[in-house]
Amino acid sequence: MFILEVMNTVKQIQDQMRRLGDVESARQAARYFKTGAGEYGAGDVFLGMRAATLHELARTHQTLNLKEVDGLLRSPVHEVRSLALLILVRQMPKADKGERRRIHEYYLANTERVNNWDLVDCSAPEIVGGYLHDKSRRPLHRLSRSKLLWDRRIAIVATLYLIRNGDCQETLTVTKRLLNDDEDLIHKAAGWMLREVGSVTSPFSRAS
């Protein structure tokens, strides 16, 4: 009975999202997120939904349990996976210690589904960086050595949470490890994080 309820909930949300999609926006998104053969987002499917709509849906459905979120994250549709991650991001700050750990571990066990730069960027700071803020940073080092592009981007983007909480050293450590990475998406993320470091460590930022 529980599994049936999960499946029904997931289907209802997916049906709702399809009704909110736009065909032309979906075509534009497919080009923007490089879904052609051989590109980093090859084969991804889009509904053509606005970011603001996804955030509103995440607020509406923020009480979904992890099984229901998992049903969304397993979708072949980009925006459905995005919604799953946005829900987890909303849940993290309010969750108790045990639930935070479950969300974090679930996320790291499913990074192959966090498979585009926007999905990483909207989720890694809170779910990975936020969780590791007062813990060992070894998971970041492991991710930075992964063969999976998205793991490596998670490793560097997750440090945004740490930067904004006064800890810049981990960003420098991970960036150094990724200096010779072959992927442009990694270099762009590292450059972004280094600019964030500069924004909080420069004399001008301290004066303001």
Image: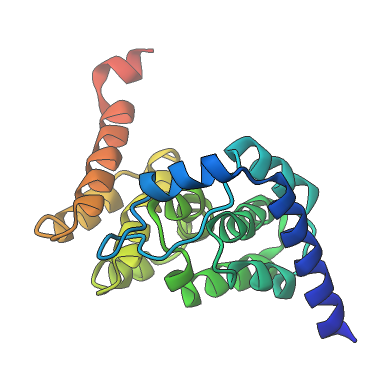
Question: Nearest the camera: 107 or 204?
Answer: 107
Q: In the image, residue 42 lies at what x, y percent?
A: 35, 64
Q: In the image, residue 154 lies at what x, y percent?
A: 37, 59
Q: Residue furthest left?
A: 180
Q: What residue appears at the point 52 percent right and 47 percent down from the top-left corner?
A: 26
Whether residue 25 is situated above or below residue 85 in the rendered picture: above
Question: Nearest the camera: 82 or 11?
Answer: 11
Q: What residue appears at the point 33 percent right and 52 percent down from the top-left corner?
A: 34
Q: Quadrant of residue 18?
A: bottom right
Q: What residue appears at the point 68 percent right and 67 percent down from the top-left corner?
A: 69
Q: In the image, residue 134 lies at what x, y percent?
A: 48, 58
Q: In the image, residue 117 lies at what x, y percent?
A: 38, 52
Q: Quadrant of residue 141?
A: bottom left
Q: Residue furthest front?
A: 24
Q: Quadrant of the N terminus?
A: bottom right
* Left or right position of 2 against 179: right
* Left or right position of 99 against 185: right
Q: What residue appears at the point 70 percent right and 71 percent down from the top-left corner?
A: 66
